Amino acid sequence: MKETELFRKADHDPASKDAKDALRLIEFLEERNAKLVELEQEEENASFGAKLADKVAAVGGSWGFIISFVTVLMIWVALNATAAIGIWDPYPFILLNLFLSTVAALQAPIILMSQNRQATRDRLRMWIDLERDRLDLEVDTFAAKVTRDAFLKLHEMDERMKRIEKLVSKKKR
C-alpha cells in the first residue's frame, strides 16, 4: 500500500492513523539524526589553530610538562650559578625570566582558546544527548501508544469473536 493511500485512509481508520503517525515520527527522527550527524562532523572538522591549541593545552596541562619544565629551570639555574660551562645568564637570570614570561604570555591565551573550544564541544555534546533522550522518549511514547492501541483492538476483536461464537452456537441449536 502506498504512503498516500495510508494518508487517505487515516481519516477513517484508526490503524491507518497510527501508520501515518509512525511515518511522521520516522521522518522526524531521520531529520533530527541528520542534524546531529552534521553537528558531530563540524566538531571533527576543526581548524589547524584549534587542533594546535588543544594539543598545546594537553601538553601544557600535564604533569610530564610541569616536571620537565621544573627540571630544565633547575638545570639552567645550576649551570649558571656554578659556572660549570660558562655563565650565559648571570644572576638574577634575566634571560630565563624573559623565556618564562614569553612562554606564559603565549601559553595562557592558547590554553584559554582550547578551554573555550572544549566548552563549546561540551555544550554541543550536551545538546546532542538531550536531543537523543527526547527522541528516545518520543519513540518510547509512540511505541507504548501503538502497543496500547493494539491491545485494545485485540480485546475488541476478542469480544466480537465471543459474540459471533455465541450467535453461531445459538443458530446451531
Image: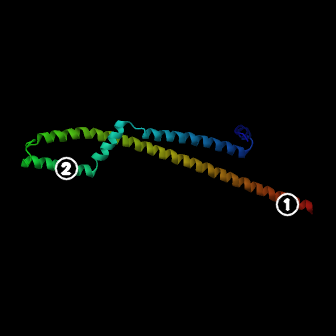
Q: In the rendered structure, find residue 70 and report the number of the disc placed on it.
A: 2
21 relative position to 37: left or right: right
Amino acid type, callout 2? Val
Return the x and y of residue 19 as percentages of the image width and height. 68, 44
What's the residue at 22%, 50% (across, down)?
A: 68
The first of marks 1 and 2 along the sequence is 2
From this view, report whether residue 113 is shown above or below residue 150.
Answer: above
Per the model, the C-alpha gap separating discs 1 and 2 is 94 Å
Residue 29 position (above or below residue 165): above
Identify the residue under disc 1: 166
Q: Residues within 10 Å of mark 1 (few under 14, many from 20)?
A: few
Label 2: which secondary element: helix
- Residue shown at the point (55%, 46%) measured from the top left: 135
**Between residues 57 and 10, which one lies in front from this camera angle?**
57
Q: Residue furthest front?
A: 85
Q: Is residue 165 left or right of residue 78?
A: right
Residue appearing at x 16%, y 47% in the figure: 73
Name the quarter where the N terminus is drawn.
Answer: top right
Task: Say which of 11 and 27 sits in front.
Answer: 27
**Picture quarter containing residue 114?**
top left
The percent position of residue 122, horizontal first and vertical second, equals: 41, 44
For the residue marked with disc 1, what is the amino acid?
Lys
